[in-house]
Image (cartoon, coloured by chain):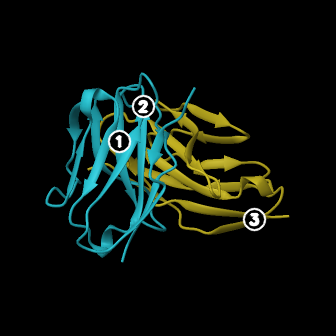
Amino acid sequence: GDSVTQMEGPVTLSEEAFLTINCTYTATGYPSLFWYVQYPGEGLQLLLKATKADDKGSNKGFEATYRKETTSFHLEKGSVQVSDSAVYFCALSEVFGSGTKLNVKP
Amino acid sequence: EAGVAQSPRYKIIEKRQSVAFWCNPISGHATLYWYQQILGQGPKLLIQFQNNGVVDDSQLPKDRFSAERLKGVDSTLKIQPAKLEDSAVYLCASSFSRDRGYEQYFGPGTRLTVT
């Protein structure tokens, strides 16, 4: 069946550092890929998505490119802020990764 | 636009008791999902509805869990009898369509503690 594997956390970075959270998937067909974020005390919300190979999703300075050849959808941000501290989930429609907690220190 | 509503927000019960959760999706969203999220893990799909029909309940422990979506709008998830390992956050989500390109909108969740 479909599955998602994402890097374990927590990830701790200083403000303005570069962020990468790795995500790889196993799926049949041509799935859509999503990153959801859960800020402290809040519910899950969509961060970005890509619906076909080579698509790049972007939002709030975050980007992820749907790579079919490597079955990956890594999340990147060039300069993180303290307000980006949250748990990030990679998802393949209804199948979610285990989440990666990001802590950004001032 | 109102978001996905869930109640109650918190529930504490003893093992072998029963509990029910309620969800009201975003208006016009045909697809409704129930997830179980254990602390430190990602959400795990329990059941997916398309209007008032079940699309996927392959991971629902049917000996103790049940769910319904009457009239294709609100939904309830019930656990009877509860076990200690059912302690988790139960998330409801909805989407416009079950086509894979549509994102899900999540409610705040119900945190269940079974003692």
Q: Nearer the viewer, residue A106 or A28?
A: A106
- x and y percentages locating residue A32 in the rendered image: 43, 35
Please say if A47 is above or below A52: below
- x and y percentages locating residue A12 in the rendered image: 71, 68
Residue mark closest to the camera, 3 vs 1: 1
Chain A, hue in figure = yellow
- Crowding around mark 1 (Cα neighbors within 10 Å: few <14, some 14 to 19, many 20+) is many
- Type of amino acid at the residue the image marks with label 1: Tyr
Q: Are marks 2 and 1 in contact (CB under 8 Å)?
A: yes
Chain letter for cyan, please. Answer: B
- x and y percentages locating residue A66 in the rendered image: 51, 38
The circle drawn on residue A57 is none
- Type of amino acid at the residue the image marks with label 2: Ser
SS class, disc 1: strand
| One can see residue B53 in this view | yes
Q: Residue at x 25, y 32 (%)?
A: B70
Please say if B15 is above or below A84: below
Q: Chain of mark 3?
A: A
**Can you identify the residue that label 1 sits on?**
B33
Q: Quadrant of the N terminus of chain B?
A: top right
Q: Residue at x 39, y 41 (%)?
A: B23
What whole-number distance in Å separates the C-alpha atoms at marks 3 and 2? 34 Å
Q: Is residue B70 left or right of residue B93?
A: left
Q: Nearer the viewer, residue A35 or B29?
A: B29
Of the residues under marks 2 and 1, which one precedes in the sequence?
A: 1
**Can you identify the residue that label 3 sits on?**
A13
Q: Residue at x 49, y 42 (%)?
A: B106
The circle drawn on residue B95 is 2
Q: Are marks 3 and 2 in contact (CB under 8 Å)?
A: no
